[in-house]
Image (tube, helix red, strand yellow):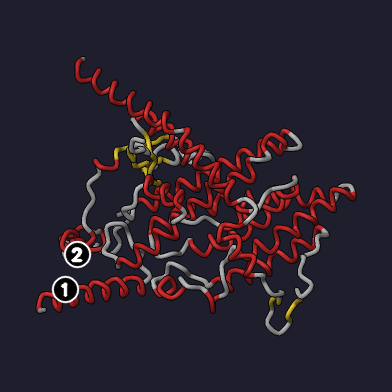
Amino acid sequence: MELLEKTDKIHEELLKNFEEKINRGDAIEPKDKMPDAYRKHLMRQMSQHAHSEVIGMQPEGNWITRAPSLRAKQILLAKIQDEGGHGLYLYSAAETLGISRDEMISQLHSGKAKYSNIFNYPALTWADIGAIGWLVDGAAIVNQVSLQRTSYGPYSRAMVRICKEESFHQRQGYEIMAKMMKGTKDQQEMAQDAMNRWWWPSLMMFGPHDSESPHTGDAVKWKIKRHSNDELRQKFIDKTVQQAEVIGLTIPDKDLKWNEAAGRYDHGAIDWNEFYRVIGGNGPCNKQRMAHHIKVHEEGVWVREAAEAYRVKKEKQLLHS
Amino acid sequence: MTKDSQLATWEVFIQSKPGANYIHAGSVHASDNKMALQNARDTYTRRGEGTSIWVAPTESITASNPDDSEMFFDPANDKVYRLPTFYVMPEGAKAI
């Protein structure tokens, strides 16, 4: 009993030190003591973030061979390579918490770890590539800019690096949309159709309303999260409406209107049933996305094995030379 | 199926321009030093961020313990005479 009380006391002391550090605005580094719940929250959030970057390569990869010009193809290739790179920054940062890459990938494959719901939608036309860059990356940027100030050092540093690279992604998407809106009637309709399909899922990327969000409490207190889901969503809407207007696209929300008193746009109700249906595995592409990731992962096993075998052979040669 | 391996991790340090310090960028997975260098280049320098890269096996890095930092770095605090501002210069002396 006495021992238990003693451990409780030590535990309390550690938590107090940790929270003082957080409140001072100090970054938490890998070797610092941190509450289990903090570590677990970060592992969950960062691995999900990394998986999203990697799974996000799929809908766009679908269009590499069909890009309408060499310029567009080069840009798309560079963008997708960036997404892969961002996944790696994030895996690397998450590994500092003591979770291995193997573990993260097997959690993805088993369904224990999620990735952003948005990538369960298909990229049906070239305009979708525009909409993904402009809206999906645009929404991601709003979230990631906020995360640059997250309390965990390695996560924050990865975010700074990612944000520097992401703004090209959003611009290339917006450029595609702007070009199509200056094109033929068919092209304009195609752009509007992509807008109609990607707008609401993009708003859902910020997660449930603050009143419904299960992970917000500790994440805010420990400064993992610096802004709430609704704050970030609002920020995204407010900056995107004007961009749509400039190129002549209509936001598919009849309730969207400027609220002069509040200095922001009010928007219509989000269909959360749709959100939970897709998260639950019943979106248009959930099975395809995961099947593809597993297939590529398994097809790559021999490469990793060969690389290991080569290392062993080289080391033996060194030993005998 | 045998246990899959994602290969060993390597820490990456990048020099942004000649003469600058090497700064830690993150880590990569690789089976050997050559692959580590190539992966580091592809992962961390897609926009000309570097002129030179170091990679080192993660396990070979020894880091100080943040819990000990007060004790570990303390000796620096009471030796203010290591700073130029400690010294009283005669009035009128120039370029010192």
Q: Is residue A191 above or below residue A219?
A: above
Q: Residue furthest bottom?
A: A261
Q: Which is more foreground, mark 1 or mark 2?
A: 1
Disc 2 crowd rating (10 Å Cα; few below 14, some 14-19, many 20+) is: few
Q: Which residue is mark 1?
A: A7
Nearer-the-camera pick, A146 or A7? A7
The chain letter for the residue carrying disc 2 is B
Secondary structure beneath dot 1 equals helix
Nearer-the-camera pick, A288 or A305? A288
| Residue type for callout 2 | Glu
| Residue type for callout 1 | Thr
Quadrant into which the C terminus of chain B falls: bottom left
Q: Residue furthest top?
A: A321
Q: Is residue A48 left or right of residue A179?
A: left
Secondary structure beneath dot 2 equals helix
How many numbered callouts? 2
Nearer-the-camera pick, A230 or A32? A230
Image coords of residue A205 (percent x, y): 59, 62
Image coords of residue A4 (percent x, y): 14, 76
Residue B87 visible in image: no
Image coords of residue A91 (percent x, y): 42, 49
Residue A241 visible in image: yes
Q: Which residue is mark 2?
A: B70
Real-space Cα distance between discs 1 and 2?
24 Å
Circles 1 and 2 on the same chain: no
Residue drawn at (72%, 36%), measured in percent from left and top?
A66
Quadrant into which the N terminus of chain B falls: top left
